[in-house]
Image (cartoon, rainbow, N blue to C red):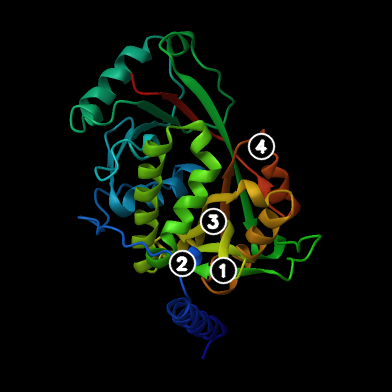
């Protein structure tokens, strides 16, 4: 048996062991969650994306799982019919910066290709895949758009560094089972983000996202991870994140999702411990070669990722406008 085959065999055994251990555990917080089944869990309208930057390429892993990615010539159309209010599941992606006069044309394209087919998609969102820094064009600014930059960070197996502090003994790293632990994940996500959004609307959005990740977990594309503390004799989710692979296994690419810590558990080094443990799982149990993380360049979390060995690469750019 070749070394590569032996490694694959060990990874498969580890994955099966993890799956069996998930079925034996009680739900976190004593709650269960049974997601609705997606009407289309397949991959449709695949386009070749070798020319896309690593950030956008791994972004599309999720849209392709339960949505549509269509090559429209000078842009990609991304739609997620099962979650039409998800801004970055329903957008147009260009590989060039907007030029003067593009606002009217791009808005018409969005209306024709997304909003007319999904009336609930009342937002407007455009992704820009370029290497140079961008500024928000005056016509987009006047129309109410904002420009967001996301820094793409990558990590190879030999770059991973151990955290400066060990995980506290009272907190356990777990590979979660989303159909069972999904409610706890949603509750934590709402606690983290609901102050920025309408709580009821955001909870519905978070539930739909967790349903997607649960379906991807069932399809063997990744896992959700948590740091679980014992409070008054019951398990409580203190921090969590997801890690999913590019379905093209030859790529060896993994992409993190929603790394966050519950507000009540911050400033204890939990984010660092969680990401480090999830990275090890990705390399050792999922046989990934490159892990991708996307973060706000002004967020303190980016320093956490760099402390573990992540290196900054090309940014991704997003023009977005809230529903009107």
Disc marking residue 234: 1
Residue 118 is situated, as x and y percent measured from the top left of the image, at 21, 33
Q: Residue at x 35, y 23 (%)?
A: 323
Relative to 306, residue 174 above or below? below
Mark 1 and mark 4 lie on one chain; the one further toward the N terminus is 1
Relative to 36, residue 208 above or below? above
Mark 4 and mark 3 lie on one chain; the one further toward the N terminus is 3
Q: Residue at x 42, y 78 (%)?
A: 23
Residue identifier under label 2: 30
Mark 3 and mark 2 lie on one chain; the one further toward the N terminus is 2
Q: CA distance from mark 3 to mark 2?
A: 20 Å
Q: CA distance from mark 1 to mark 4?
A: 32 Å
Residue 190 is situated, as x and y percent measured from the top left of the image, at 48, 44
Q: Residue at x 52, y 17 (%)?
A: 136
Disc marking residue 241: 3
Q: Would residue 298 appear left or right of 123 to someone viewing this image?
A: right
Q: CA distance from mark 1 to mark 3?
A: 21 Å
Q: Residue at x 64, y 60 (%)?
A: 274
Q: Is residue 289 visible?
A: no
Residue 277 position by quadrant: bottom right
Q: CA distance from mark 2 to mark 4?
A: 33 Å
Name the residue nearer the viewer: 210 or 17: 210
Q: Is residue 176 visible?
A: yes
């Amino acid at each position: 048996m070749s070394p590569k085959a032996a490694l694959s065999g060990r990874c498969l055994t580890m994955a099966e062991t993890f799956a069996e251990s998930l079925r034996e555990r009680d739900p976190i917080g004593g709650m269960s969650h049974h997601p609705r089944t997606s009407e289309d869990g397949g991959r449709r309208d695949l386009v070749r994306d070798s020319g896309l930057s690593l950030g956008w390429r791994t972004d599309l892993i999720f849209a392709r799982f339960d949505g549509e990615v269509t090559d429209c010539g000078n842009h990609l159309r991304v739609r997620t019919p099962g979650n039409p209010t998800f801004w970055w599941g329903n957008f147009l992606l260009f590989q060039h910066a907007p030029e003067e006069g593009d606002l009217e044309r791009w808005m018409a394209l969005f209306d024709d290709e997304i909003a007319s087919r999904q009336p609930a998609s009342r937002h407007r969102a455009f992704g820009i895949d370029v290497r140079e820094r961008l500024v928000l064009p005056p016509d987009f600014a006047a129309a109410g758009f904002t420009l967001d930059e996301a820094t793409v960070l990558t990590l190879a197996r030999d770059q991973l560094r151990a955290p400066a502090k060990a995980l506290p003994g009272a907190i356990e790293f777990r590979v979660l089972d989303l159909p069972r632990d999904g409610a706890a994940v949603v509750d934590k996500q709402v606690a983290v983000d609901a102050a920025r959004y309408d709580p009821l609307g955001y909870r519905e959005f978070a539930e739909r996202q967790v349903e997607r990740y649960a379906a991807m977990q069932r399809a063997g594309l990744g896992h959700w991870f948590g740091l679980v503390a014992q409070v008054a004799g019951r398990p409580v989710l203190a921090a969590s994140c997801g890690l999913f692979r590019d379905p093209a296994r030859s790529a060896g690419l993994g992409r993190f999702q929603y790394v966050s810590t519950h507000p009540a558990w911050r400033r204890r080094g939990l984010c660092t411990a969680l990401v480090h443990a999830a990275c090890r799982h990705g390399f050792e149990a999922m046989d990934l070669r490159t892990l991708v993380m996307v973060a706000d360049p002004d967020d303190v979390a980016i320093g956490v990722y760099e402390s573990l060995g992540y290196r900054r690469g090309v940014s991704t750019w997003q023009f977005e406008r809230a529903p009107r």
